[in-house]
Amino acid sequence: MNAMSQALKGYAEHATSTKSGRRSEYEVVAKVTKQLRDSAVEAKTNFAAFASALHMNQRLWTALVVDVADEANPLPDELKARIMYLADFTRHHTTRVLRENASVLPLLEINMAVLRGLKAEGGEK
């Protein structure tokens, strides 16, 4: 199992939070993921929209890192580290996607894994 798989599995297995907080997180991640997925389909004809969606995804991951870096965050340290790793991966991979040297699919897969983790813990009804 590679590091990304472990991080994704860890998020799904260990994430804990309040139900209302989870629902809000789920909705934000779902919205950003949908925007990224939809814009990727038309990236060749509307690169500006695609770049904007990549930027929004990057902002999402920056916000997640800020949240897990807070000492008051109740998530286990191992999960915090995995989220930080994924944020770092996302930042680097986004640069590669923007240069048109990489596929957007890994970014979508990461976000979908986060959504599954949030849903498993009661994030969506």
Image (tube, rainbow, N blue to C red):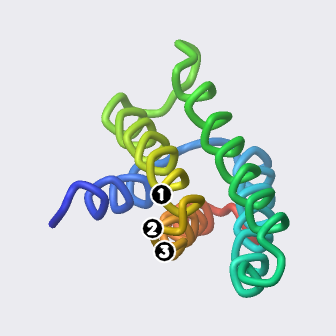
Quadrant hosting residue 99 = bottom right
Of the pair 68 and 33, the residue shown nearer to us: 33
Give the residue at x 75% y 68%.
Answer: 50
Dot placed on the residue nearer the N-terminal end, 1 or 3? 1
Disc 1 is placed on an element classified as helix
- The picture places residue 56, in percent across and down from the top left corner, at 76, 51
Task: Residue under label 1, please give it.
Answer: 96
- The picture places residue 10, in percent across and down from the top left corner, at 34, 53
Dot 1 amino acid type: Arg
Task: Residue under label 3, please give it.
Answer: 103
Marks 1/3: CA–CA distance: 8 Å
| 11 to 42, vertically: above or below | above
Task: Residue under label 2, please give it.
Answer: 101
Marks 2/1: CA–CA distance: 5 Å
Dot placed on the residue nearer the N-terminal end, 2 or 1? 1
| 67 to 19, vertically: above or below | above
| 23 to 74, vertically: above or below | below
| 2 to 61, vertically: above or below | below
Dot 3 amino acid type: Ser
Picture quarter with the N terminus: bottom left
Disc 2 is placed on an element classified as loop
- The picture places residue 72, in percent across and down from the top left corner, at 58, 15
- The picture places residue 20, in percent across and down from the top left corner, at 79, 48
